């Protein structure tokens, strides 16, 4: 061992001297551009004989394939399995059982090892059951319920092959051994585990016992095999189980096809080493597959799930994680949905507030515009009331002069007298209206007096009938008197305007009709003006808005004046559409005399 370390040190010193010399000469070492090929293997699983055979194989490959850089990477079993999944290397060497356990699409066996003791690559790996010489265990059946020592917990020849033999003899492999102790490699550790009392049976790989006899004959002499099988072929080692293919050289999906071809040719062309190790082609990996299927292990582990209980027992950690994920997703979904609802509600409220604010702004603008128009109309009304007195006075004086002149003339027609009197009455009416308008401008209250609605309505209806001859006016009134307290001129203006609107709305009908209905209630009198005109919703809406008219030439001022005058008289005014008629209702309080009559 010391000589080997000295040689390594000398070689390292020489390499360092050469490298430093090249740098001193002004040159640098050349960069190796050859493709790098990595080979993974498990050195701890090999016997000394097999380890020497693999070392000779690696040296041979490096000599025969100089176009590649070959790197040997040593792994533990679990790490090699992870490396296969993660594509950490281009090739790997593993037991046939390991190869078939991790087999997936893309893996390809290139060659299988042969040895002098196992020249057939299909029948090279088995297990021999070893017990102490003084052990009461004589047969395979006697091993039931005992503790066994294997190289590691998932070893192919140490665990799966022995359990396959147990199943072949009719026993339940899952409950045959009381415990399988992982004693490690080399096989000497299994025998020592039995001697230490940690196990009662050693599950040794076939042919390792024969190798151990060369180095530890005294140890091997203390044990004996049980359940031996006869060797019908060329296999020259003790065995207690069936045989399976030997160590296999496998290409992964990372291996280039040219490299796979070159490695296959090199391995199959390699001459036997001094110890007789060579490489051939295994054609029967089906035996390893069938073993896993029998044991319901490896790629056939899913066969153990035969019920819901089996599924839950095997996959309960994943099920718990899945359920937690589902619950978390549901909670997250509910929370997100709640937050979305809250944000949506807040957004809707914000939009509604914005709409309300816009409507309020628009309404304010309309009110301001109406106030401006009312102010303008008020100013114009005052101006008109002031200026109209002159023409009216001139007309009135002229009519008075004409009347005096006609009194001296006995020859004039009576029609002229009536015409003059009519003009004078209308001038007086205009003067009265102007006077009241000027009082409104000065904010003076007009005098109120009792009005008997029945007779007052009859006069207005008769006048309207003469003005609108195509429209039929009808008045319905109660037999008793109904009196209110109001200014007569305001009363006449309001009722005339409402009836005029009704007559104009229905005069295009074939049977135009305006019906005035007077109704007496306990404390109020109601005057309803109904017309059968085709009034639409837009017209009614305009009628409810000040200074907006449904007529092409209207200003919307008439109904505003009507509503204002009625409300000043402590009444109310409304326009609705009922049963095919437009109904304008005026409600006014009764006089105290009428209320007293009701009370009496």
Image (cartoon, helix red, strand yellow):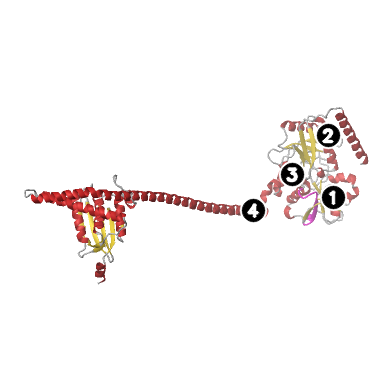
Q: Residues within 10 Å of mark 3 (few under 14, many from 20)?
A: some
Between the C-alphas of marks 3 and 2, the distance is 25 Å
Q: Residues within 10 Å of mark 2 (few under 14, many from 20)?
A: few
Which residue is the site of mark 3?
81
Between the C-alphas of marks 1 and 4, the distance is 39 Å
* Residue 489 among magenta residues: no
- Asked if residue 322 lies left or right of residue 100, the reply is left
Between the C-alphas of marks 3 and 4, the distance is 25 Å
The span picked out in magenta is: 141-154
Which residue is the site of mark 2?
59
Which residue is the site of mark 4?
319
- Front residue of 28 and 122: 28
Q: Which mark is residue 189?
A: 1
Nearest to N terminus: mark 3 or mark 2: 2
Horizontal and vertical percent for residue 563?
A: 31, 55
When the figure is inspected, residue 457 is found, relative to residue 230, above or below; the finding is: below
């Amino acid at each position: 061992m010391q000589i080997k370390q000295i040689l390594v040190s000398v070689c390292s010193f020489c390499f360092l001297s050469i490298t430093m010399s090249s740098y001193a000469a002004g040159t640098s070492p050349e960069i190796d551009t050859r493709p790098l090929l990595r080979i993974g293997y498990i050195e701890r699983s090999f016997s000394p004989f097999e380890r020497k055979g693999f070392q000779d194989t690696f040296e041979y490959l490096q000599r025969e394939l100089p176009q590649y850089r070959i790197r040997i990477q040593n792994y533990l079993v679990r790490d090699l399995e992870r490396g296969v999944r993660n594509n950490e290397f281009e090739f790997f060497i593993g037991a046939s059982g390991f190869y078939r356990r991790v087999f997936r699409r893309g893996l390809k066996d290139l060659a299988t090892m042969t040895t002098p003791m196992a020249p057939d690559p299909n029948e090279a790996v088995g297990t021999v059951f070893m017990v102490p010489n003084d052990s009461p265990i004589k047969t395979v059946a006697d091993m039931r319920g005992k503790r066994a020592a294997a190289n590691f917990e998932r070893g192919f020849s140490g665990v799966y092959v022995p359990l396959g033999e147990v199943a072949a003899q009719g026993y339940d492999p899952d409950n045959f051994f009381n415990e399988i102790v992982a004693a490690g490699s080399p096989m000497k550790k299994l025998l020592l585990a039995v001697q230490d009392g940690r196990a009662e049976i050693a599950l040794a790989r076939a042919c390792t016992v024969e190798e151990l006899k060369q180095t530890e004959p005294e140890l091997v002499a203390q044990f004996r095999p049980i359940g031996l099988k006869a060797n019908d072929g060329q296999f020259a080692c003790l065995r207690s189980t069936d045989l399976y293919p030997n160590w296999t050289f496998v290409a992964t999906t990372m291996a280039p096809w040219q490299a796979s071809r070159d490695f296959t040719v090199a391995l199959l062309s390699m001459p036997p080493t001094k110890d007789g190790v060579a490489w051939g082609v295994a054609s029967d990996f089906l035996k390893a597959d069938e073993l896993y299927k029998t044991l319901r292990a490896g790629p056939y582990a899913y066969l153990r799930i035969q019920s819901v209980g089996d599924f839950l027992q095997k996959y309960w950690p994943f099920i718990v994680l899945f359920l937690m994920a589902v619950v978390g997703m549901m909670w997250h979904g509910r929370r997100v949905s709640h937050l979305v609802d809250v944000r949506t509600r807040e957004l809707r409220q914000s939009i509604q507030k914005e709409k309300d604010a816009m409507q309020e702004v628009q309404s304010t603008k309309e009110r301001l515009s109406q106030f401006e128009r009312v102010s303008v109309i008020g100013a114009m009304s005052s101006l008109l009331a002031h200026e109209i007195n002159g023409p009216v006075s001139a007309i009135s004086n002229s009519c008075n002069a004409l009347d005096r002149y006609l009194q001296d003339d006995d020859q004039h027609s009576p029609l002229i007298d009536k015409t003059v009197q009519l003009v004078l009455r209308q001038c007086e009416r205009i003067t009265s209206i102007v006077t009241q308008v000027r009082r409104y401008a000065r904010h003076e209250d007009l005098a109120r007096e009792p009005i008997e609605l029945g007779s007052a309505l009859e006069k207005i209806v008769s006048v309207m009938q003469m003005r609108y001859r195509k429209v039929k006016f009808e008045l319905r009134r109660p037999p008793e008197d109904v009196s209110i307290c109001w200014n007569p001129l305001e009363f006449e203006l309001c009722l005339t305007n409402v009836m005029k609107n009704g007559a104009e709305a229905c005069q295009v009908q074939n049977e135009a009709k305006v019906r005035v209905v007077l109704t007496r209630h306990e404390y109020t009198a109601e005057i309803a003006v109904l017309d059968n005109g085709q009034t639409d919703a837009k017209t009614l809406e305009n009628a409810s808005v000040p200074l907006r008219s449904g007529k092409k030439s209207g200003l919307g001022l008439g109904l505003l004046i009507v509503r204002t005058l009625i409300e000043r008289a402590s009444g109310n005014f409304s326009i609705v559409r009922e049963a095919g008629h437009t109904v304008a209702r005026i409600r006014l309080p009764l006089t105290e005399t009428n209320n007293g009559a009701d009370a009496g």
